[in-house]
Image: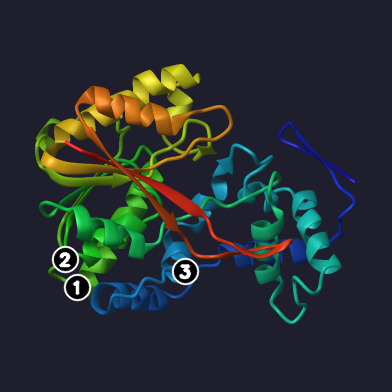
């Protein structure tokens, strides 16, 4: 079977046709939102009980946006699979041909999503998300005041982590739909806990300086875009504005680090989750730019995230590299 879509091609022997009715049912189930009561319960558990589970929050506010993201090593986004049936029929074939990995007793949508996770490499993949417990650990250990700066907002986890430890959240992101969803999440949190701190989220690129934030932040912790590692599709993303890696470094990443330096109070930390990939040496360049800006490199933390299923191994644990710099 040869699948051609949006200029990309997949040759596969794993394929199972499905009716339009089944296709549309799977698509509807994927985008179906949980009940608002489920979302409110998760928020309540995070804000009042120290819990860290967010599946309903993520599905309600962010799943459709995450599905649009195309990773650099994938042919298509998850949203593409739900727009072009042959792509989904490839994953349906994986499910039908491997009942041990994808038990028929489970709902089909669960097996399809599992097929994306453990068999989607190079084809389609959902972007990953942070864990609240990591955000809380970082903020608890390195904050100097109650103002937290996040120059790339992600999928709401760092916002929730900030509110759960009673810190004001200052966010920057060019994805205007994401910014709107983050505010919706915040106002729902405020309905549940009226005395939570305020938030200030700016819909723009982090390379653009915000004068009123200068010398105000007690910590900066973020996971920035890695040049073309992920294409978020919406808004003036840095990969749209700066096409070459050199231009991206000089016009986006370097100004962002300079701006963070100006935002932070003295002795505050800039903490960045970043990694090398392909030929791009982002770790070394980040240390170099930060040092030139005036930061002192404080070392690197390695954080082992939740285990994920893998078809050839029992489980794998993604390792995050967290770089620390002090002003």
Circle 1 residue: 193
Question: Residue 208, can we see it?
Answer: no
Circle 3 residue: 55
Find numbered disc 2 in the image and state the secondary structure of the residue it sits on.
loop
Circle 2 residue: 196
Q: Residues within 10 Å of mark 1 (few under 14, many from 20)?
A: some
Give the residue drawn at x 49%, y 40%: 232
83 relative position to 168: left or right? right
Answer yes or no: do the residues labelled 2 and 1 have beta carbons within 8 Å? yes
| Sequence-first tag of 3 and 2 | 3
Displayed quadrant of residue 236: top left
x, y percent for residue 15: 86, 56
77 relative position to 275: left or right? right
Task: Give above or below for 226 relative to 144.
Answer: above
Find numbered disc 3 in the image and state the secondary structure of the residue it sits on.
helix
Measure the alpha-carbon separation of dots 2 and 1. 6 Å
| Sequence-first tag of 3 and 1 | 3
Task: Give above or below for 31 relative to 75.
Answer: below
């Amino acid at each position: 079977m040869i699948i051609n879509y949006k200029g990309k091609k997949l040759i596969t022997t794993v394929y199972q046709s499905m009716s339009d009715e089944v296709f549309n049912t799977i698509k509807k189930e994927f985008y179906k939102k949980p009940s608002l009561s489920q979302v409110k319960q998760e928020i309540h558990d995070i804000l009042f009980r120290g819990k860290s589970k967010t599946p309903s929050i993520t599905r309600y506010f962010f799943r459709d946006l995450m599905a649009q993201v195309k990773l650099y090593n994938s042919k298509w986004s998850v949203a593409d699979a739900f727009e072009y049936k042959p792509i989904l029929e490839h994953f349906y074939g994986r499910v039908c041909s491997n009942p041990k990995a994808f038990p028929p007793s489970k709902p089909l949508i669960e097996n399809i999503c599992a097929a994306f996770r453990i068999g989607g490499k190079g084809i389609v993949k959902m972007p990953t998300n942070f864990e609240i417990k990591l955000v809380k650990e970082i903020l608890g250990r390195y904050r100097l005041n109650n103002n937290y700066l996040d120059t790339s907002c992600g999928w709401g986890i760092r916002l929730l982590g900030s509110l759960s430890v009673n810190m004001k959240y200052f966010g920057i992101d060019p994805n205007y739909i994401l910014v709107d969803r983050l505010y919706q999440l915040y106002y729902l949190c405020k309905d549940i806990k009226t005395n939570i701190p305020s938030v200030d989220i700016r819909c723009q690129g982090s390379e653009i300086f915000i004068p009123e934030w200068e010398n105000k932040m007690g910590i900066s912790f973020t996971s920035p875009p890695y040049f073309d590692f992920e294409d978020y599709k919406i808004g003036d993303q840095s990969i749209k504005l700066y096409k070459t890696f050199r231009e991206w470094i000089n016009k986006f990443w370097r100004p962002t680090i300079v701006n963070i330096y100006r935002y932070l109070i003295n002795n505050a930390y800039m903490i960045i989750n970043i990694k090398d990939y392909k030929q791009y040496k982002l770790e070394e360049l980040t240390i170099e730019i930060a040092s030139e800006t005036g930061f002192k490199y404080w070392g690197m933390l390695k954080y082992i995230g939740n285990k994920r299923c893998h078809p050839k191994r029992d489980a794998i644990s993604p390792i995050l590299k967290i770089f620390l710099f002090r002003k």
